[in-house]
Image (spheres, grey):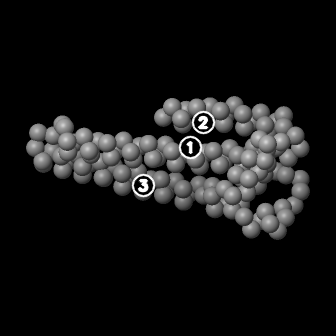
Amino acid sequence: CLTISMATTATAMLGPGLALRGPEGSMHVAVDGILLEFQHMSRIFHGTIFAWLGVVVVYAWTAIAPTPITSMLVTAMSVGTAFVMLARISLVEAHLPLRRMALVSGAFFAPTADQTKQSLPESAEREFAQGFRA
């Protein structure tokens, strides 16, 4: 969770600064970078929660449960929670398709044929990395 807190703070502070005060075309790079970091942070956050549910199951089978029935009950609740979380994540991603929709960056130039064929994460990652090298 500390990684997620640091990444969200850095993105919230540095992204708008790059967009407003960066060189020509930096708005496009900042928006793509913020979207890319959002995807990475949400994956890390979901992974952290699923890892915690796994630890709960392991702990239930090794240390805390007085009977096997208690361990099975904790396991069933953890697996049920994981399925509900996966269903909600799928629902939110279906309604907010950040990876599938075309990105409107507000740039004043038409995208090249090469840019339109690439998906958002590939082009965003390359431009975001180039923005830091410049």
- Foreground label between 3 and 2: 2
Q: In the image, residue 18 lies at what x, y percent?
A: 78, 37
The amino acid type found where label 3 is placed reads Leu
**Residue on which disc 2 sits:** 7
Give the x, y percent position of residue 73. Answer: 19, 48
How far apart are the two marked residues, 1 and 2, measured between alpha carbons?
A: 7 Å
The secondary structure type at the circle numbered 2 is helix
Q: Who's the residue at 61% across and 45% down the image?
A: 38
Residue 37: give x, y in percent of width and height. Answer: 63, 44
Left or right for 48, reference 21: left
Task: Evaluate if marks 1 and 2 touch, with contact meaning CB atoms under 8 Å apart.
Answer: yes
Query: Which amino acid is tagged 1?
Result: Met
Q: Residue at coordinates 29% horizontally, 42% vertically from top-left? A: 56
Q: Which mark is residue 122?
A: none
Tag 1 residue: 41
* Residue in the foreground of this view, choosing between 42 and 129: 129
Report, in whole angstroms, how far the alpha carbon at label 1 lies from the one at label 3.
16 Å
Q: Earlier in the sequence, mark 1 or mark 2?
A: 2
The residue that disc 3 covers is 86
